[in-house]
Image (cartoon, rainbow, N blue to C red):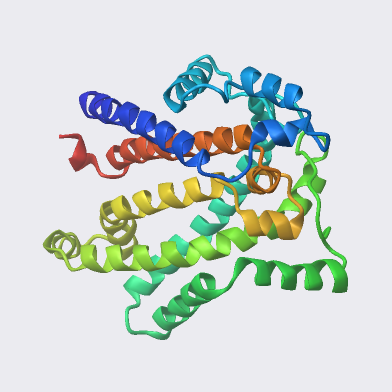
Amino acid sequence: MLDFLLRRLAQVLPTLLFVSMLIFGLQQLLPGDPARILAGEEQDPAVIAHLRERLHLDEPLPVRYAYWMGGVLRGDLGESLRTQQPVLDLVRQKLPVTLQLAAMAFVIALAIGIPAGIVAAVGRGTWWDSLANAVALWGISTPNFWLGILMILLFSVQLGWLPASGYVSPFEDLKASLASTIMPAFVLGNAIAGVLMRHTRSAMLQVLSADYIATARSKGLYERTVILKHALRNALTPVITLGALELGTLLSGAVLTEQVFSIPGFGKLIVDAVFNRDYAVVQGVVLVTATAYVALSLLADRAYFAANPKLRV
């Protein structure tokens, strides 16, 4: 298992290098000159020349990439062109918000999607199967922004149970933090739950038709033991892969949901950076997101061994 993970890590490093080159290269295609943006309305040529020299904009593209990559390796993602704050500090401010929202949404998705998928597979062709498929179709087809607005109208405007927008850190007030994030977390988790349910159902149906499941039943094992211990563990491999990808999507920032609920997370950060042409922030956030995807892929590989002991051989 250790050798396998080391081989995967050896594959990951060139991938991250290629991604960094892609991020930096595509960033240069965006319109606008950062030096002119920073120079303000006067557009003094001397100021523009000084800014281009300070930001290495007068250097060839490979040299600028080398400067940027050298800073990344030292933990320096550059400075925001708008606020002059280090990009790493902005990431540290916004990442905990997105982590909390993503964790809550993922727990909600797992709590709905996997049990619904198991019930649908075990009760194939029954009304339980139809109900679970209806729930999955609802989650997949419902636009997040529309569901978010409806929840605000119901739980905030009509009932007054939850705040309509904003964010409170759990370190300040845990109850207020949960109240401010439960609606956006449910909106995000609802969509992922539908996808998880469909994949869990498909994987469970395939496993339940295997010979070793019939053997386990012929031994007189309880049906719950057959379903949860023998079938589910072998069906989890594709679900783990999907879960890692969906969690990476959540960590990259749910742009529309964060905008609807005014959550100051990664999604809002990158949207503001794109509109403000804050190139350093865009590069830093996208690089952090790509690294999160790669890290989740490695964690998924490790989870395969925990879920299915046969893969350890």
Q: Quadrant of the N terminus?
A: top left
Q: To which quarter of the image does residue 270 belong?
A: top right
Q: In this orientation, does residue 204 appear?
A: yes
Query: What residue appears at the point 47 percent right and 76 percent down from the top-left corner?
Result: 137
Q: Quadrant of the C terminus?
A: top left
Of 88 and 215, nearer the camera is 88
Query: What residue appears at the point 29 percent right and 50 percent down from the top-left corner?
Result: 237
Of 225 and 67, nearer the camera is 67
**151 relative to 156 in the view: left or right:** left
**103 relative to 294 in the view: left or right:** right
**257 relative to 38 in the view: left or right:** left
> In the image, is residue 311 above or below residue 69?
below
Of 13 and 172, nearer the camera is 13
Residue 216 lies, in percent from the top left, at 18, 59
Residue 275 lies, in percent from the top left, at 68, 48
Q: In this orientation, does residue 93 appear?
A: no
> In the image, is residue 267 above or below residue 4?
below
> In the image, is residue 254 above or below residue 191?
above
Query: What residue appears at the point 55 percent right and 49 percent down from the top-left corner?
Result: 250
Residue 227 lies, in percent from the top left, at 31, 61
Residue 293 lies, in percent from the top left, at 44, 40
Q: To which quarter of the image does residue 200 belong?
A: bottom left
Q: Residue furthest top?
A: 74
